[in-house]
Amino acid sequence: MKKTKGLTLIEVLITILIISILAGVAGPSFLRSFDSRKLVSATEQLYSHLQLARSESLTRSASIYWTANSLGSKSWAFGFSTSASCDPLITSNTAANACVLNIDDGDGNYVAADDDVLHRISGSDFDDITIRRTYTSLATDAITFDHLRGTIDQNNRYYTLTSALGSTVRIHLTLLGRVKICSDDLSDYKDCN
């Protein structure tokens, strides 16, 4: 008589049970990791946009206007331009009031479709991340970067980014135009305290 090789029902059930236990233990950790990465990504985008707006004001010797809309919700947007009426919700570089900077494509002719480059970021790129300006409940915000020193026009600004699981990161924009990041929840940044 030949012996048949294979798995018994008990062995299959034990294997499924072990896999289920491991998935139950590792699942929340994976969710926290994905949540943290989304928050870091949104933070780095905001940070780099603020830094770029400041450096463009110095490079161009012109004031740069940074604008944010829908703060406090998941549908936020921010952008900057040399125009004070920049609307970061506009997605076409040829539309009036779009957040664009003119960057010559080298042909010597100005054509908006070729030479105006959008400088905007949308909350739709970062699922479940909200941004609000700390110490105010306004849904819009505007900053002017001075072209002589790179300073901002008003008081220090604090923005808080919050993930779906409640982790927060704070961005501090000083009067001198310096951008600082801190978080009590993520190890990627120094503590806020």
Image (tube, grey):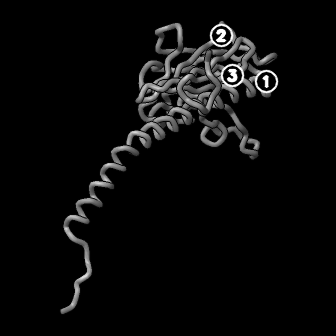
The relative height of residue 114 versus residue 62 in the rendered view (above or below) is below
Return the residue at label 3: 179
Q: Residues within 10 Å of mark 1 (few under 14, many from 20)?
A: some
- What is the distance, in whole Å, between disc 3 and disc 2 at their CAs? 10 Å
Q: Residues within 10 Å of mark 2 (few under 14, many from 20)?
A: few
Say which element carries label 3. Answer: strand
- What is the distance, in whole Å, between disc 1 and disc 3 at their CAs? 16 Å
- Choose the circle earlier in sequence order: 1 or 3: 1
**Residue type at numbered disc 3:** Val
Q: Report the quarter where the C terminus lies.
A: top right
- What is the distance, in whole Å, between disc 1 and disc 2 at their CAs? 19 Å
Say which element carries label 1. Answer: helix
Residue 67 spot, x, y in % from top left: 57, 20
Return the residue at label 1: 58
Return the residue at label 2: 156
Q: Nearer the viewer, residue 158 or 4?
A: 4
Query: Residue at the spot x=44%, y=18% of the render?
Result: 72
- Choose the circle earlier in sequence order: 3 or 2: 2
Say which element carries label 2. Answer: loop
Residue 76 visible, this angle: no
